[in-house]
Amino acid sequence: MTIYETSDLVKLNQTFENKAAFLMALRTKCVTEGFQTKPKYSDKGRYAANCISPNCAWHITARCIKDSNNFQVRDLNDLHTCSNTQFLPNNKHANKKVLGNILKEVMKQEGRVYRPYDIRNYMSAQFKISLSYHQVWKAKCYAIDMLRGSMEESFRILPLYLHNLKLCNPGSVTNIRTDKENRLVMSYMSIGAAIRSFVHYGRPVIIVDGAHLKGGYLGTNLIAVAIDANNGILPLAYGIGAGEATDHWTWFFGNLRDTLQSSRCCIKNLTIISNRAVAIAVGISIVFLEVFHALCCRHLLGNLKTKSRRVKSYEWHYWKMCKAYRKSDFKYHYKILRRRLPDSTKTLTDVGFNRWSRHHADHVRYAYLTSNSAESMNALSVHARKLPITVLL
């Protein structure tokens, strides 16, 4: 006879909220202790099971308490008389709900990425069971839903969250756009503290960019960041939409303009930096008529490289043109590029010197020639963009 280590998941006379809670505890016990059960009978008001091994003395009986849904363990022999309770590396009780409940406690640790491969190795070492990638993936998704809520539930509570956000953060601005069927199309959020910091202490430069969401419901995270007086990144506004279409960016910029105007920000002095996305350019031209729209020099260089491989050899001259303060310095490097890379130089001319050159800029853009600040925020949110929308915001 082999005596197996028992747990306190299921005990004699223990009461559970309902039958489902009892079965969850029983199956978790089976997985953690390494044995399987075979139901003897099971209906709405009672449940009995034996160990799957023949002639084993382990058995359990539970019944529903009268006039309630509570389930109580009435009889339990927690002693195994079989030689080996786990015949195969697979355990039939190891479904996504049982594994998800086990993983839920493990995945509470913040700042760590749990890959299915790591989870499978952990389960194999801890409980001596073999799991497929598909099993582990479903268990991980179930555990995440229990910890953070489901995607659908997150959409449902989004208006409530944004309402309370404005109550707890004075000056915050939020907005939601829905379609005819009351489904979310766009959402906008700007924290009051960030707005006040930008209006009173920030430099009049806003950098915008978008990043794709990675959850069950795909979309785009639109972001506008500013720079404070200490050269720190100041997240100014967030938007969630179905994509980066012109309509989405225009709606986002409209809310951003209303936010700044309500805080008495001088719109005419603003400079907005972005990549060459057409949707962003159209949105800015519609909403911010008097704002100077500058381009990210790094994105522009990437566009030139896709058209000619030779651009990389003259990259130094390009950056000298972007950073030049004096007209003579700009002309010197421009002549070299025009002689060596006529096609790329024509592209730079067509785009407009004022859009990317510091010397020709219509407004002051300070030392910010790229959209690296927004890209840094996108890099910071790479894991957060997998979360449900309310948790993400």
Image (cartoon, grey):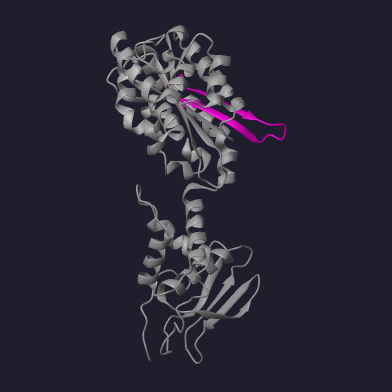
Total labels: the figure holds 0
Above or below — where is 104 with respect to 393?
Answer: below
Does the image show residue 326?
no
Tell me what residue is drawn at x 38 percent, y 58 percent.
106
- In magenta stretch: residue 313: no
Tell me what residue is drawn at x 34 percent, y 23 percent.
318
- Left or right placement of residue 125 versus residue 16 in this view: left
Q: From this viewpoint, which residue is outermost toward the right?
A: 180
Quadrant assignment, res 360: top left
Tell me what residue is drawn at x 53 percent, y 27 percent.
188
Which segment is the magenta one? 168-193
> Which residue is nearer to you in this view: 263 or 378?
378
Quadrant assignment, res 219: top right
Q: Quadrant of the N terminus?
A: bottom left
- Left or right placement of residue 56 versus residue 315 in this view: right
Tell me what residue is drawn at x 55 percent, y 25 percent.
278
> Which residue is nearer to you in this view: 308 or 387?
308
Above or below — where is 60 with respect to 211?
Answer: below
Above or below — where is 206 with respect to 79?
Answer: above
Please provide percent x and percent y for residue 102.
43, 62
Q: From this viewpoint, which residue is outermost toward the front?
A: 339
Please provide percent x and percent y for residue 118.
38, 61
> Which residue is nearer to you in this view: 61 or 270?
270
Please provide percent x and percent y for residue 11.
44, 72
Please provide percent x and percent y for residue 249.
56, 25
- In magenta stretch: residue 181: yes
Does the image show residue 179?
yes
